[in-house]
Amino acid sequence: MKVGLYLQDRTLQGKKAEKEFNRVLESVNAANLDLFVFPEHAYSPFNDELYSLNLCDYSDGETADTERIEDIVLEISEKAGCPIVFASSDSHDMIYSYYANPNAADDETYLNFYVKHIATSFSAFEFSDYADMPDNLYAPVLYKGYRIGRTICYDSTQPLFSRAFGVNGVDIIINSTGGHVDYKKWSYYQKVRAIENKCFTLCTMGYSDATARNISYVFGYDPCGRQLKYSILNLDRSGSTSRNLPGKVYIFDINKEIFHDILKCKSFENDEYLNQPETLNKNQDFVIRPDALSNILSKSKKIDTGLYLHKYNDKNIIIAYCREKDILKPELVASMLYSEKIEKISNKRYIIINEWNQLYDSFYKGVLSNVLKVRAAENFCAVILKSNDLQKCYQVGNCKNSQTIKLVNGAFGIDLSRTTGPEALWKNKEGLGVRKEWRKGYEVLLKHILYKANDK
């Protein structure tokens, strides 16, 4: 299946923007793509109208304009000559991703929308009936024998939003991002979402500020975490094949017959930042030796399977212990970190331990190195890897970039101020679009995923 990712140039205004929009749709139509994907906050000539419409019934006296929104995305799809994924926002700043296929066959999806959860003014978590929504919200789009899921921007930084599609057996997860992100951080998230859900991941974004420190990119990974090759529609005379050319359409050819089981992959692609420098924390308020982990666990209180409480000064260190490939299942990790059995414990700090009896070098370099760094970032905790011949420790800074901690005299010095876990993630953050009460919705989603996973 040929999927076009539009790295839209949002710096264009007025008539120039509309002219470019129509030109690109004509090119896409002529290229006979199977699916065309817009970024978050995509431009279209209909934007002023879209921003004035209500996707849902928000309160008494307000009516939903869903039918008009669907008419617009269907019209854009008709011009593109193929199904589209179009991400916009409504009058209440609810950010949504709409899939539209005006020529859907009887067994295919005609229209389907997904609503953003975090880094937003109005979250899907705010629906009063959210507990009843996952079956519909995460129902895969059906198209040409493929099952497709969609997320929006920062939703890809928390694993359960993608995993809810993963337990539904999707072949592709598409992320529409606003733009101007840190390449290292975003590439890690997209790659790991592919690995843990055994699917392809695709991500595109907008290019709205030519002076921004971070650039906008497209990303594509296969179920083994390897970067996908692409071609560029209407490549200009410069001949550049960079993944960050504003206004270009990047075409990825997806073949779902590739391995969908990471443990059966015949080859891996090394972590792009495998050899990043190992550094010491300025604040080392908890020093831990990998060869003493079993001793620490034996002296800790066992709360549940794989879940321990270790008292350290005035801190309560929650240790989540994962054997080998269990670390690849984000719902298993989350079930420990969000366990109701630790809810009332105060002053918590979080450490994940992943232990392997035998760890193949290629698997560590191509898969596990990425996964462990993302586990540290998405859970704001420390992660320790222990195997017979390899010990590693990862943390992240407040900007969620990974740090590999240096082993000194057989020990890692962990900064516990950066291990506050879910309590750090789910708190009111002005300007960042996160609210403390949304954690309840995330826990609802976790229960839904665990039920679906166990049901399989």
Image: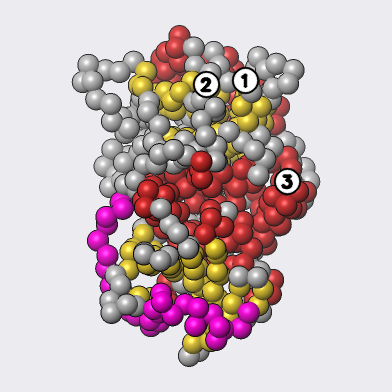
User: Front-most of 293 and 58?
Assistant: 293
Residue 355's x, y, as percent?
A: 48, 65
Mark 1 and mark 3: span between their CA atoms? 24 Å
Q: Earlier in the sequence, mark 1 or mark 3?
A: 1
Identify residue type, mark 1. Lys
Of labels 2 and 1, earlier in sequence is 2
Instruction: Specify few, some or many for label 2: CA neighbours under 10 Å numbering under 14, 14-19, or 20 or more.
Output: some
Residue lying at the far bottom of the rendered structure: 313
Residue at horizontal 59 percent and vertical 77 percent from the top: 308
The local secondary structure at tag 1 comes to: loop
Q: Secondary structure at mark 3?
A: loop
Q: Which residue is mark 2?
A: 1
Residue hosting label 1: 144
Q: Which residues fall within the magenta stretch?
A: 273-302
Residue type at mark 3 is Lys
Callouts 1 and 3 close, C-beta under 8 Å: no
